[in-house]
Amino acid sequence: MVLTLAVVVMWLGTSMPWLIALVVGLGIDGGWLATLAYERRLAAQGDHSTPVTAVGWGFGLVATGVLVAHAVTADGSASAWLAVAWLPLAAKALWLVHGMWERTALTGSALEAIQGIQQEARDEAAVARARLRAEAGTEETRLTAVTQAGARVARVQAQTATTLARAWSTLESTRSGKDTGRALTSVTTRVTPGVTPTWELPVWGPTNPVPALDAAPGLSDAELDRLVDEIRHSETPALSYREMSTRFRAAGHSASEVRLRGAWKRVAA
């Protein structure tokens, strides 16, 4: 504002009385200051007026135009005056930014609440990361232990298989030998003519022979169809194939899956 007033007095003072130039400069600066004050009042009330804003930018453009015109007509110092010609518009833009900052300003309690929320979120994230790292370490330790135990079991099984293979190889070579086969035959009971008898584990105490279970006679297709139909219609609504099959076998009946499914298709058709 001071720069605009000085330029107006210096520029117009040569062509008119300096008092008139002073009034013109004060008019420009006064109008600009009045619009800024009114905008400030509206902003404090939470209101906004587009015409007032337009008038304020208009005064800013006028002040910038005065400085640019003076810089163009000045002798020897045009670049210096052009360097400061943007100051009125810059002041207006700074005022605009200040108004936006005031509209987004928060109280101390709100800022403390926001900081508390952010800190709580950071704490939860840190705890979650620590928990994941701990679980990953525990899982890695468990997998390592399981892998090592599996390797030990595999080594023991391999060693046992090798020992058994060697023992059976020795036994087979002993039984197939000419002289050793005769010696074994002389002290064991022959089970198959011409073949060296097998070795059996000794049995201590009395034993009772277990009679062989007779295989149940197979069901004919007609009997199988009748049983499937009875089990299927034992409940209402009729049972599904899975339920019928389960009850069929639970009742002690025996039939292959192919025959049972074929009987089901014949009955359900």
Image (spheres, helix red, strand yellow):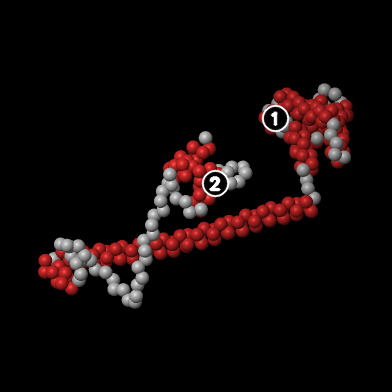
Q: Residues within 10 Å of mark 2 (few under 14, many from 20)?
A: some
The residue lying at 13 percent from left, 66 percent from top is 177
What kind of residue is marked 2?
Ile
SS at circle 2: helix
Residue 244, placed above or below residue 190: above
Q: Position of residue 244 (x, y in %)?
A: 53, 46
Outermost residue toward the left in this view: 179
Q: Residues within 10 Å of mark 1 (few under 14, many from 20)?
A: some
Q: Position of residue 258 (x, y in %)?
A: 43, 42
Question: Could you tell whether 41 is left or right of 100 in the image?
Answer: right
Q: Position of residue 34 (x, y in %)?
A: 87, 34
The one of 195 and 27 positioned closer to us in this rendering: 195
Measure the alpha-carbon separation of dots 2 and 1. 107 Å
Disc nearest the viewer among 2 and 1: 2
Q: Is residue 91 visible?
A: no
Q: Which residue is mark 2?
A: 231
The one of 246 and 106 positioned closer to us in this rendering: 246
Image quadrant of residue 175?
Answer: bottom left
Q: Position of residue 67 (x, y in %)?
A: 75, 28
Question: Could you tell whether 185 is left or right of 118 in the image?
Answer: left
The one of 7 and 128 positioned closer to us in this rendering: 128
Outermost residue toward the bottom in this view: 205
Q: Residue 200 — which label?
A: none
Q: Residue 82 — which label?
A: 1
Q: Tag 1 or tag 2, which sits nearer the N-term?
A: 1
The residue lying at 72 percent from left, 32 percent from top is 86
Q: Quadrant of the N terminus?
A: top right
SS at circle 1: helix
The residue lying at 30 percent from left, 66 percent from top is 160
Question: Could you tell whether 183 is left or right of 26 in the image?
Answer: left
